[in-house]
Image (cartoon, coloured by chain):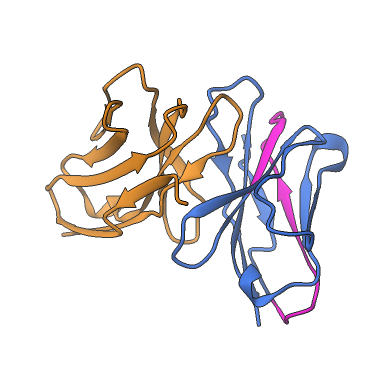
Chain colours: A blue, B orange
């Protein structure tokens, strides 16, 4: 079974630019989560999809962040326009509906905003 | 307000020793407490998890101890090996399928 994949692995952009991160969950996993770890801090929740619906987006920092999961498969997270404080590692995780909440994480996308 | 506090931030242990990482939580409604292990360049991987109806869970060299009254839980790594050198995160969640609230992480180095 293939794991959670994320693209790109690294992204370096300038302040004000737009970046789109992609996550492909494990096949059959209806739950999809985005998390972010800013340098030296804890991993923080951003949002949770169940299939194509946003179940919880309480962790989204502001309206510069837009997440989509059209068709309930892969998800994208767009940051527009990027700010310096958006730098960090963005993780995607997935899990089966009705599971014991075991979430499988992808390798992350390291975003650097200059 | 950090709901899950993890200590220490870093830990150095000799090969064969016991590594102990502690976490404290605030929300008494949390009902799932996993530990994740992360190697450089990889995502966090579930190591072991516990629910509050048990006080201890052991899987191989890894043990979670859970103290519900103190709102604390800890990870013990017995016979620590250099291959255990990684960053460890505790976490907590409320209900199946819900978000994980993470501690700040502990960088463990096991010296040969």
Query: x, y (%) of residue A70?
Result: 87, 42
Report the side of A72 relative to B1 (left or right): right
Is residue A41 shown above or below B44? Answer: below
Report the side of B85 relative to B45 (left or right): left
Q: Is any atom of residue B52 visible in this view?
A: yes
**Residue B91 placement: quadrant:** top left
Query: x, y (%) of residue B96?
Result: 57, 24
Q: Residue A105 lies in magenta, yes or no? A: no
Residue nearest the observer in this picture, A81 or B88: A81
Query: x, y (%) of residue A62?
Result: 73, 59
Is residue B101 shown above or below B64? Answer: below
Residue plotted at (46% across, 46% down): B102
Q: Quadrant of the N terminus of chain A?
A: top right
Instruction: Write the start and end of the magenta stretch as one range.
Output: A13-34
**Residue A4 placement: quadrant:** top right
Residue nearest the observer in this picture, B39 or B96: B96
Query: x, y (%) of residue A31?
Result: 68, 33
Residue nearest the observer in this picture, A84 or B77: A84
């Amino acid at each position: 079974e293939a794991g959670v994949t994320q693209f790109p692995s690294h992204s370096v952009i300038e302040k004000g630019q737009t970046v789109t991160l992609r996550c492909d969950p494990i096949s059959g996993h209806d739950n999809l989560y985005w998390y972010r770890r800013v340098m030296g801090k804890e991993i923080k929740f951003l949002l949770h999809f169940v299939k194509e619906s946003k179940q919880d987006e309480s962790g989204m920092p502001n309206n510069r962040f837009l997440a989509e999961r059209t068709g309930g498969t892969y998800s994208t997270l767009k940051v527009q326009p990027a700010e310096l404080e958006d730098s960090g590692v963005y993780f995607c995780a997935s899990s089966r509906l009705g599971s014991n909440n075991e979430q499988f994480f992808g390798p992350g996308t390291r975003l650097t905003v200059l | 307000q950090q709901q899950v506090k993890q200590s220490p931030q870093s830990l150095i242990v000799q090969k064969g020793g016991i590594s102990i990482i502690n976490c404290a939580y605030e929300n008494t409604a949390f009902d799932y407490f996993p530990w994740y292990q992360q190697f450089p360049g990889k995502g966090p991987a579930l190591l072991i998890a516990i629910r509050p109806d048990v006080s201890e869970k052991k899987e191989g060299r890894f043990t979670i101890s859970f103290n519900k009254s103190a709102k604390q839980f800890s990870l013990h790594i017995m016979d620590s090996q250099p291959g255990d050198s990684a960053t460890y995160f505790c976490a907590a969640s409320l209900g199946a399928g819900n978000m994980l609230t993470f501690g700040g992480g502990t960088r463990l180095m096991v010296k040969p």
